[in-house]
């Protein structure tokens, strides 16, 4: 029986992950401008657009030279952040953006592992962290479902100078009863935005 907690502090990096994928329209505009420029400088060459590339068909005079020019078309999928799987030994897997790494409680092998708690993962910015704890034992289904903002503060509030809960929501993660808590906290005089996932995993 396990109780799993994942606590994300100062998750400003999420905004960067979402905005990084938003310039699909600009890529096609740039391709059009490149095509126009190529046509104006090469009046005897025609342009074709194929899936994933823009290519220029050579004139009869150029065919003997063997120079084919291609430009990759950067797709939206290629710009999206890649995922990394962290193995929580004896519990299961945690999937995060590839820019997270283990800084304590485990190792960063080909499949990063977490085997000591609390384990701390850090985002590439150096300021955003994810702390993971696994505790033996869990509450009954009824007791866990009865949790409220006030009972949460009674258990976890002492860890902070202050805590202001913005969202307290019961969710289900792969069949595991959980709570998602979003809050603004102050710890050692510093302000953080926190996302806390609290799961009650019977197995």
Image (cartoon, rainbow, N blue to C red):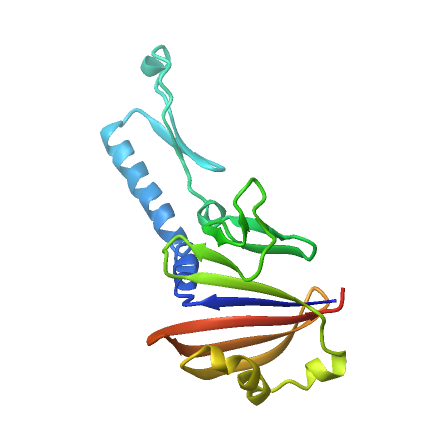
Whether residue 34 sits left or right of residue 171 in the image: it is: left
Percent across and percent down for residue 13 are 40, 61
Q: Quadrant of the C terminus?
A: bottom right
Residue 72, image x and y in percent? 41, 35
> Between 52 and 45, which is closer to the camera in this rendering?
52
Q: Residue at the spot x=39%, y=65% of the render? A: 12
Residue at screen point 32% across, 37% down: 35
Say above or below: 67 vs 78. above
Nearest the camera: 124 or 52? 124
**Quarter holding residue 185:** bottom left
Specify whether 155 is left or right of 202. left
Quarter placement of the N terminus: bottom right
Name of the residue lying farthest toward the left: 41
Query: Is residue 85 depicted above or below 45 in this figure?
Result: below
Spot the residue most to the top.
Answer: 64
Q: Identify the residue at horizontal 40%, vertical 67% (top origin).
A: 10
In the depicted structure, whether residue 128 falls above or below residue 147? above
Q: How many marks?
A: 0
> Where does residue 145 sit, x and y in percent of width and height?
69, 82
Considering every residue shown, the one lying at the far bottom of the view is 150
Residue in the foreground of this view, choosing between 17 and 88:
88
Q: Pinpoint residue 136: horizontal percent, then vertical percent.
A: 69, 67
In-image side of 71 versus 1 (left or right): left
> Horizontally, is 156 left or right of 42 in the view?
right
């Amino acid at each position: 029986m396990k109780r799993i907690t994942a606590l994300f502090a100062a998750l400003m990096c999420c905004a960067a992950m979402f905005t990084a994928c938003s310039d699909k329209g600009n890529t096609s505009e740039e391709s059009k401008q490149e095509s126009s420029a190529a046509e104006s400088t090469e009046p005897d060459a025609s342009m074709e657009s194929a899936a994933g590339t823009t290519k220029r068909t050579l004139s009869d005079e150029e065919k003997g030279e063997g120079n084919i020019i291609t430009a990759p078309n950067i797709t939206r999928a290629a710009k999206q952040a890649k995922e990394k799987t962290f193995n929580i030994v004896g519990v299961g897997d945690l999937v995060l953006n590839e820019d997270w790494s283990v800084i304590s409680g485990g190792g960063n092998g080909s499949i990063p592992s977490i085997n000591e708690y609390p384990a701390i993962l850090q985002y590439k910015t150096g300021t955003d962290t994810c702390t993971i704890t696994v505790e033996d034992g869990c509450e009954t289904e009824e007791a866990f479902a009865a949790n409220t903002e006030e009972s949460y503060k009674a258990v976890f509030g002492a860890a902070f100078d202050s805590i202001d809960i913005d969202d307290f929501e019961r969710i289900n993660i792969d069949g595991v009863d959980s709570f998602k808590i979003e809050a603004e906290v102050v710890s050692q005089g510093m302000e953080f935005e926190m996302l806390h996932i609290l799961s009650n995993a019977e197995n």
